[in-house]
Image: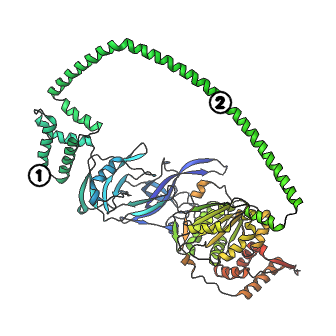
Amino acid sequence: MSIQMIALLKIYKKTVTKEDGTTFPASGAQPYAIYENGKMQFIYGAAIRDYFPNSGKIYANNHPIPQQDYYGIFELEEALLYNADLPYSSKYGIKNEVQDIKLYEAINMNIQYETQKYEITNIIQAGFDLNFMPSKDIFLKTSDNYLIGPIQFEEVNGKYFCKEENYIFCYKNEITFYSIYDSFNNSTRHFTIDHPSVKEHVDWIDVAKKDRIISEALKQLKDNEEFGDMSRRVIKGLKKLYTQDQEIHLKERLERAINLIESQTLDKEVTEEYLKLLLNLDVTKQSIQRQVDERFNAEYNKFFEENKKMIKEVRSLKEQDLKVKEELHKKNLKLQFINEELSEVKNTMDFEITKLKEKFSEEYVKQLKEASLPAIVQSCNLQNSNNGKELFAVWQSIEGIKLDNIEGFKINFQHNINEFKGSNSEKLATTILSAVMLNEPILLHGKGSQELAKLITHSISSLQTLVLIPELETTSLNDIHNQYMKFEDTNTIKSLVIHDPHTTSALYSLPTFFREQKWGHEGITPNLTIITLSTLDEAREFIGKMSSSPLIAAGDYIKSTITPYKLRNLQASSLLLNALEEYEIKEESRVLRKRFREWVEDEHGFDIEIPIELTSWLNQLTILFEEENELYDWIYKVFRTSCTLVKEVEVEL
């Protein structure tokens, strides 16, 4: 017998790529909660794979492809194609949607029921602008914790309107709604399967349209058609009904009808409905017909009297209009010709100006050499020649999971690496954590280095990431430091990403800047600094100055085609800084350096000089690596450029 369960799923449309590179659309399903014993248990973070191995998702390829993402409660069964050895395999598939368990969604309203009850009616009738497709059954939740509903929406020209046109229940809220953050459209959804109890019902919200209000009020006076002064007697009759004993919501509707008629501000629809009732009276029909006949005959005779003169005036206006259009066409052609000539002249002038500038620069340099100006003057001119800001900065802040332990970070990081078919990320994740604890930069090089940097920051600091790209040859360290003011949250990790700094003067100043940054104010300086390098050849001098930073090849982790869709599929998360407090560095510098040097000699036949800067990394990584050989192999790989070869060692065979 197949294993079955009931779960809350998000159904969405995805694109599947076959082995031959072709693609096709399919349905995807993401679980958020399971239903057991009449309760909905919501699941967060890495725990979702415990309930839904191996991928943490539901097999849904046989489910109809949705036009828009939506949430629902579905019965699941074990998938026939499930393979426990494949990390992308899903254990469960969709059997059918559950009909006897209702899913309610809450939409928050920034308004209070107790003081703004009548304004709620206007807001509901005006419709809602939503960036997602709402669920079938909706509660409107006021800011003073009342629930209005449940109601259903219909979409009209991009807005969602309430289908109900009469009264809606209003309850005092005693229900807990569970929140789900939808990163695809950057919205937070609120769900429950519970319905308010009858004892919490406090009122009705009247959402009837004006025409219905007037119509129902007039129908209560249907037996009184014999009166002559309709408006006066209608209002008098309605007020009489209003004073009688009726339920409060019926009296409120009568009051709205009286106000509408007395104010004489009825819109077109309400007026037409009101007039229909009046026009059914015989005396009204006769009076209107008589006035229509009189006015029609008068206008008919007047039209024929003035017809000849009007035709002559129309013909004259048409001739004038034709002449004006012909003249305008000639002027437009002339203007077009002038603009073309002006463009040619401008291009010629720009070309000549460029030639003059080049000639002037050559002559100026020549004269400068001949004049033998002192070096201090030339240096001063160069320093003052660039006063602008040559820095492109992007601040990234994405809501995601807040992680309070490093294991949770490693699991989420591996999940994100899997999106790009990368290898096991355990060593890289451990190095990233060590870089945070040591406050040392890490270097990523090669194709995909920017994407790997994005993947790392999305996994460890999605709330606080600053990306900098130097634009010209001169980069101001003050400009970089001023960008740190965007960091606000001192509890989560803050990341700084700099792309290709070696192409600017930062080649000489940034290494010192980072060493000074280690002792900066913890609240505003980044905890993790990532430097991406497009090519190694152009960056070797810069790498040589960063001897205490690991050099990691992005190609080991980014192995599939990179698309914006895959980047959106990454799970955003931020690691809390206090998760690292338990990992204190143990100072065993001499022993670790000696063992590592001996290992390199045994494994690679080299005698190397280990820089003192590498000692902190050895101390820190020893805490996080379980196997010593695995640790030394990784250190040798990412810090090889930092070590100096003393001599080759002859190995006895």
Dividing the picture into quadrants, the one containing residue 287 is top left
Mark 2 and mark 1: Cα distance apart in space: 79 Å
What residue do we see at 28% from left, 46% from top? 165
Dividing the picture into quadrants, the one containing residue 575 is bottom right
Q: Residues within 10 Å of mark 2 (few under 14, many from 20)?
A: few
Q: Of residues 559 and 183, which is closer to you in this image?
A: 183
Colour scheme in the image? rainbow
Relative to 582, 198 lies left or right: left
- Residue 440 appears in the figure: yes
Relative to 222, 63 lies left or right: right
Q: Of residues 492 and 377, which is closer to you in this image?
A: 377
Question: At which x and y percent is residue 634?
Answer: 72, 74
- Residue 413 appears in the figure: no
Figure quadrant of the C terminus: bottom right
Give residue 169's mark: none
Q: Of residues 515 and 48, which is closer to you in this image?
A: 515
* Residue linked to disc 2: 336
Q: Amino acid at mark 2?
A: Gln
Dividing the picture into quadrants, the one containing residue 571 is bottom right
Relative to 317, 377 lies left or right: right
- For the view shown, which residue lies furthest in the front direction? 371
Mark found first going from the N terminus, 2 or 1: 1
Q: Secondary structure at mark 1?
A: loop
Q: Amino acid at mark 1?
A: Asp
* Residue linked to disc 1: 245
What residue do we see at 65% from left, 30% from top? 336
Question: At which x and y percent is residue 621?
Answer: 67, 79
